[in-house]
């Protein structure tokens, strides 16, 4: 019996395809307007696009209540469900998916198709007073046409009594200890930050899950304390047509985590303030193609050219080292260039190419399983010993 391809699997394959199966068609001759705007706004806060739809503006308003973040990932579930999945799933699979959505709505009171956004936020921490590195905190925030309190109730039921309540401000956080990680953290202190998982309803239709400390910071941010940097947020959602987008400050994260800004108890003024490494990347689509665009700040034109040449050299080396022709064509499709203070990554690839890639990736597994089922191993009969008569 043929197994139905899970929509989640398709999404994961699609996102992976942006990294390993990108084919550039006009990468050297075209440039999206977002890149131009970003290149001219490196040292100033970006403002929301005045032409964004009310829905996107609503997302921006909601996310502006979040705490500070060093790296962000934005996912547009509705566009993926309504525009991407129909290109990859059969009519039967789409029907099964919508039946699953209807069942979730009937049983849990939430329609996955009504989730407006998913945002993954990562916040790095300063070292402790005894100079120990601290793992970053992670939080996933979802918003849409659903009841966050109802989902909190379902989480309590699903935890079978393991979810305990903690009052913080005017909110109630549900906390649960992850026993296997807690046990392992006794041997490896680095895992201590991941021993607990929390969930909280930030608003009537916004739910956050993640590190308890980050959830408390989200509650504080809702009260107006240490909210997310609007420049980072506007950068993340600057392209309203993005299926998935990323933004972050790796240099700032490194400086914070390794004591360049001091420790939790002893702050230190930075000796060098630079936005080098700050990046933005997005996956968008039109009628026939997926387009991947990335840009990273290099601080100045000379550094941008040096980094672009370094990345291009590494890419050429990887291309020549790989013998597989398909992988070679993929790597050759990536275009890395320097423009002004930035390093740009650009690639376009056809939707049909991704569909064929997924088919090819699925085919060997199906054939292999079929071959395994059809092969019948017949034991070799033992050799007969020849009898000889003894002569008297």
Image (spheres, helix red, strand yellow):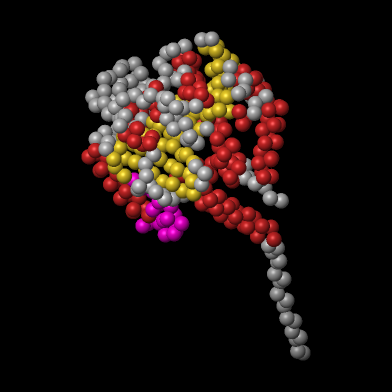
Side (left or right) of 264 relative to 100: left
At which x and y percent is residue 124? Answer: 40, 26
Return the x and y of residue 18 as percentages of the image width and height: 46, 44
Residue beneath the point at 34% across and 36% down: 36
The question of residue 323 being in magenta is answered with yes
Which residue, as the protein is rendered here, is positioned at the far bottom? 392
Q: Nearer the viewer, residue 66 or 152?
A: 66
Q: Quadrant of residue 89?
A: top right
The residue closer to the viewer here, 311 or 116, is: 116
Q: Residue at image x 41%, y 46%?
A: 347
- Height in image: 169 above or below 281? above
Where does residue 367 sit, x and y in percent of width and height? 63, 57
**351 left or right of 339 in image:** right
**Residue 182 in view:** no
- From the viewer's perspective, is 201 left or right of 334? right
Q: Nearer the viewer, residue 129 or 144?
A: 144
Residue 137 or 113: which is nearer the viewer? 113
The residue sitting at the front extreme is 51
Q: Residue at x 48, y 14 (%)?
A: 222
Residue 132 percent across, percent down from the top left: 37, 25
Say left or right for 22 vs 263. Answer: right
Query: Which residues are the magenta region?
Result: 320-336
Residue at point 40% right, 32% down?
247
Q: Is residue 28 above or below residue 229?
A: below
Question: Tag count in the figure?
Answer: 0
Camera sees residue 383: yes
* Rendered-image quadrant of the C terminus: bottom right
Q: Tell whether position 54 is magenta.
A: no
């Amino acid at each position: 019996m043929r197994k139905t391809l899970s929509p989640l699997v398709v999404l994961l394959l699609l996102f992976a395809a942006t990294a390993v199966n990108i084919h550039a068609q006009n990468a050297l001759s075209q440039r999206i307007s977002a890149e131009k705007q970003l290149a001219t706004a490196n040292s100033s806060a970006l403002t929301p696009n005045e032409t964004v739809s009310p829905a996107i503006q609503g997302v921006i308003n909601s996310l502006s209540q979040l705490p500070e973040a060093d790296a962000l990932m934005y996912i547009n579930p509705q566009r993926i469900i309504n525009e991407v999945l129909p290109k990859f799933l059969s009519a039967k699979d789409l029907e099964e998916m919508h039946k699953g959505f209807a069942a979730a709505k009937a049983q849990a009171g939430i329609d996955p198709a009504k989730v407006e956004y998913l945002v993954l936020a990562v916040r790095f921490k300063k070292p402790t007073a005894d100079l120990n590195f601290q793992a970053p905190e992670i939080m996933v925030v979802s918003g849409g046409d659903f009841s966050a309190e109802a989902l909190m109730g379902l989480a309590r039921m699903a935890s079978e009594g393991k979810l305990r309540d903690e009052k913080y401000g005017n909110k109630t956080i549900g906390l649960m200890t992850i026993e296997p990680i807690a046990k392992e953290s006794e041997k490896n202190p680095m895992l201590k930050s991941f021993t607990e998982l929390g969930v909280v309803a930030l608003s009537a239709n916004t739910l956050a899950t993640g590190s308890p400390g980050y959830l408390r910071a989200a509650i504080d941010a809702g009260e107006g304390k240490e909210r997310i940097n609007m420049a980072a947020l506007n950068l993340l959602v600057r392209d309203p047509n993005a299926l998935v987008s990323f933004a972050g400050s790796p240099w700032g994260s490194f400086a914070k985590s390794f004591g360049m800004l001091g420790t939790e108890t002893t702050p230190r003024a930075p000796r060098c303030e630079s936005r080098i490494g700050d990046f933005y990347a997005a996956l968008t689509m039109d009628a026939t193609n997926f387009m991947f665009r990335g840009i990273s700040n290099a601080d100045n034109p000379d550094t941008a050219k040096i980094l672009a040449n370094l990345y291009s050299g590494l890419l050429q080396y990887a291309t020549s080292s790989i013998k597989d022709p398909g992988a070679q064509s993929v790597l050759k499709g990536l275009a890395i260039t320097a423009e002004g203070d930035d390093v740009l990554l650009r690639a376009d690839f056809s939707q049909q190419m991704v569909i064929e890639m997924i088919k090819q990736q699925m085919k060997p597994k199906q054939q292999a399983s079929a071959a395994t089922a059809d092969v019948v191993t017949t034991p070799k009969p033992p050799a007969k010993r020849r009898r000889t008569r003894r002569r008297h």
